[in-house]
Image (cartoon, helix red, strand yellow):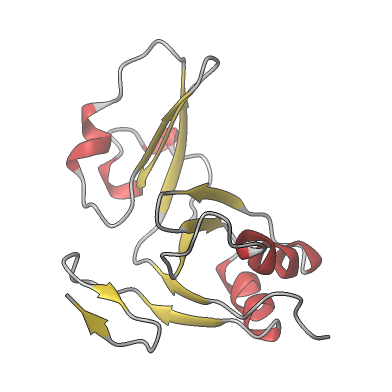
Amino acid sequence: MPMPFPARVLRRLPGRFAVCRFDPDEPVPRWALDGPVEFISVTRTRVELSVICPVEVLPDPDLAGLEWHCLQIEGPFDFDELGVLASVVDPLAQAGVSVFAVATYDTDYLLVTDIDGARRALLAAGHEIRPAVTDARTRPSASGGEHR
């Protein structure tokens, strides 16, 4: 089945992640910001405070609930580029893989509990999955190399 959007390169971030919910008036937990900075997301709305962080920084393992794996869609891409998220979420939905998506200025991140199912579905759809770049000072280029 041809893809309506271009194939994407995704990077699997190391480790596992927790998605934690707090009341909207609670302060951002300091422990969430003190951990490794591979990926941390803090979102506050009128009804909740959500924190996504590596599981190893949690002071209480019960805060984690499910453990998630994180895939970064290699970016950056323009805000008006169509189908970025749909191109990767649609194959996951068709394969029965649940997704928790987070967007940043440069790119999108997918959190999944079934990393093996996600990998199979994304590869079958024509996407590529690469290991994470571990040096935070570098950004992968479209060719898979690095530039500073």
Please count the marks in the image: 0
Expressed as whole percent of the image width and height from the top left, the position of residue 84 reads 60, 64
In the picture provided, is 117 more to the left or to the right than 142?
right
Depicted 24 relative to depicted 134: above or below: above
Expressed as whole percent of the image width and height from the top left, the position of residue 71 reads 48, 65
Q: Where, by quadrant of the figure, is residue 90 drawn?
A: bottom right
Depicted 78 relative to depicted 144: above or below: above
Q: Residue at x 42, y 73 (%)?
A: 11
In the picture provided, is 86 more to the left or to the right than 54?
right
**Residue at the right extreme?**
1
**Residue at the top extreme?**
25
Depicted 53 relative to depicted 78: above or below: above
In the picture provided, is 68 more to the left or to the right than 92?
left
Q: Residue at x 23, y 37 (%)?
A: 33
Locate the N terminus and report the quarter of the image it occupies: bottom right
Locate the C terminus and report the quarter of the image it occupies: bottom left
Q: Residue at x 47, y 60 (%)?
A: 69
Query: Which one is in front, 25 or 116?
Result: 25
Expressed as whole percent of the image width and height from the top left, the position of residue 136 reads 19, 64
Q: Where, by quadrant of the figure, is residue 140 drawn?
A: bottom left
Q: Residue at x 42, y 49 (%)?
A: 104
Expressed as whole percent of the image width and height from the top left, the position of residue 134 reads 23, 72
